[in-house]
Amino acid sequence: MEKDKNCVFCKIIDGEIPAYKIFEDENVLAFLDISQVTKGHTLVVSKKHYDNFLSTPKEIVHKVMDVAQRIGQVQVEFLGAKGVNILTNCYPAAGQTVMHFHVHVIPRYDQNDNFILEMKTKDDSKLNLPVLAKQIKKELK
Ligand code: 5GP
Ligand code: ZN
């Protein structure tokens, strides 16, 4: 997909909206998130407009992830991060607000550094895990 004229990330890619860019090549752009969850919070985006991770060609996903990995390494080695969260939201139900594929690279400094990701364990007594596994496995073939 090419540019979407209403997309804020397409506008950043085109230079219509300013951003603090930290990496750019033919396929990928990385820039600081306007809302810094932690110091150095970065977005890595495909230059072409795809709605999200799930609808992006895998070659492009791989290129975006390569850049995300390198930025995470720099955050740990040179920014003083003790860890990094790599996150990509797909669809509003998962918290996606900008419908252009992007990966958050969020440096972590300590447990109270403003970023909370909570995975509560669901009561799985009503879930049939063998059936569930079989159902998903069948579709992956
Ligand atoms: P999502 O919730 O879709 O995974 O994340 C979208 C992210 O884009 C948010 O963290 C938000 O702060 C960031 N964002 C939205 N508009 C802009 C903008 O104009 N400039 C920059 N640098 N980041 C933006
Ligand atoms: Zn876009």
Image (cartoon, rainbow, N blue to C red):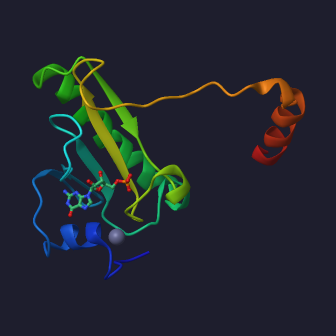
**Rendered view: 27 above or below 33:** below
Considering the image in quadrants, where does the C terminus appear?
Answer: top right
Q: Position of residue 70 (x, y in %)?
A: 25, 34
Task: Please provide percent x and percent y for residue 87.
Answer: 41, 40
* Residue 86 on image: x %, y %: 38, 35
Identity of the residue drawn at 27% across and 21% down: 112
Left or right position of 78 against 95: left
Determine which quarter of the picture holds residue 10.
Answer: bottom left
Residue 91 in view of the camera:
no
Closer to the camera in the image, 27 or 17: 17
Q: Is residue 76 left or right of residue 83?
A: left
Counting labels gives 0
- Residue at x 27%, y 70% (from the top left corner): 8
Question: Would residue 108 be visible to someone looking at this image?
Answer: yes
Residue drawn at (31%, 82%) of the image: 5
Determine the residue positioned at 38% across, 42% down.
65
Q: Nearer the viewer, residue 20 or 27?
A: 20
Against 106, residue 97 (above or below) is below
Q: Pick whichever, 101 or 91, lies toward us.
A: 91
In the depicted structure, whether residue 76 falls above or below residue 26 = above
Q: Quadrant of ligand 1?
A: bottom left
Most extreme residue toward the bottom is 5
Left/right placement of residue 49 relative to residue 16 reads right
- The quarter of the rendered structure image containing the N terminus is bottom left
Could you say where residue 82 lies in the image, as x and y percent from the top left? 24, 17
Occupied quadrant, residue 81: top left
Q: Quadrant of residue 128?
A: top right
